[in-house]
Amino acid sequence: MRTAAQRIAHYEARMVSSLIDPVLTAINAAAVANYTAYAMAFVPFQSQLQTQLDGDSILGPIRLLYEAYFGELYGLKQRMQGPALNAMGQIMHDKYEALGCATGTLVPAAAILGITVS
């Protein structure tokens, strides 16, 4: 898994181009700053998830479901808080449980973000 610094460097390399109009330079700088903030916040949580999935021996395509679940929860956490966040987290939990994910792994994954599900 790439570190936050590696992800940011890759993003910056993609965004730098001789084709970018000078007017767009400020927009580009803002985009890079936003991505940097996202990567610095998300990568530590994702590292914890990877450790948990490795510990639970989650391998293969099903692992992508757990990562998608975690990404959806992270997005919810950025927009909500309190009981509404936990209620939406429970809905996501039920959705991914129906897709075949184990509750024993979904609950700790949500706990990484501080979301309470059962």
Image (cartoon, rainbow, N blue to C red):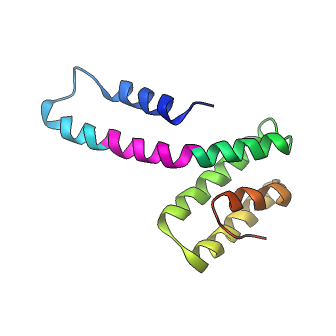
Residue 112 lies, in percent from the top left, at 68, 57
From the viewer's perspective, is 8 left or right of 45? left
Occupied quadrant, residue 50: top right
Residue 11 lies, in percent from the top left, at 41, 31
Check the picture and name the quadrant holding the N terminus: top right
Furthest residue toward bottom: 83
Q: Is residue 62 visible?
A: no
Residue 9 lies, in percent from the top left, at 42, 27
Occupied quadrant, residue 115: bottom right
Q: Is 36 within the magenta?
A: yes
**Closer to the camera, 92 or 57?**
57
**Closer to the camera, 80 or 114?**
114
| Most common SS among magenta residues | helix
For the magenta stretch, what is the residue range?
31-43
From the viewer's perspective, is 74 left or right of 97? left
Occupied quadrant, residue 91: bottom right
Residue appearing at x 55%, y 33% in the figure: 3
Could you tell me how many numbered marks the image carries?
0
Residue appearing at x 60%, y 79% in the figure: 83
Check the picture and name the quadrant holding the C terminus: bottom right
From the viewer's perspective, is 74 left or right of 34? right
Residue appearing at x 65%, y 49% in the figure: 68
Q: Is 38 within the magenta?
A: yes
**Closer to the camera, 77 or 47?**
47
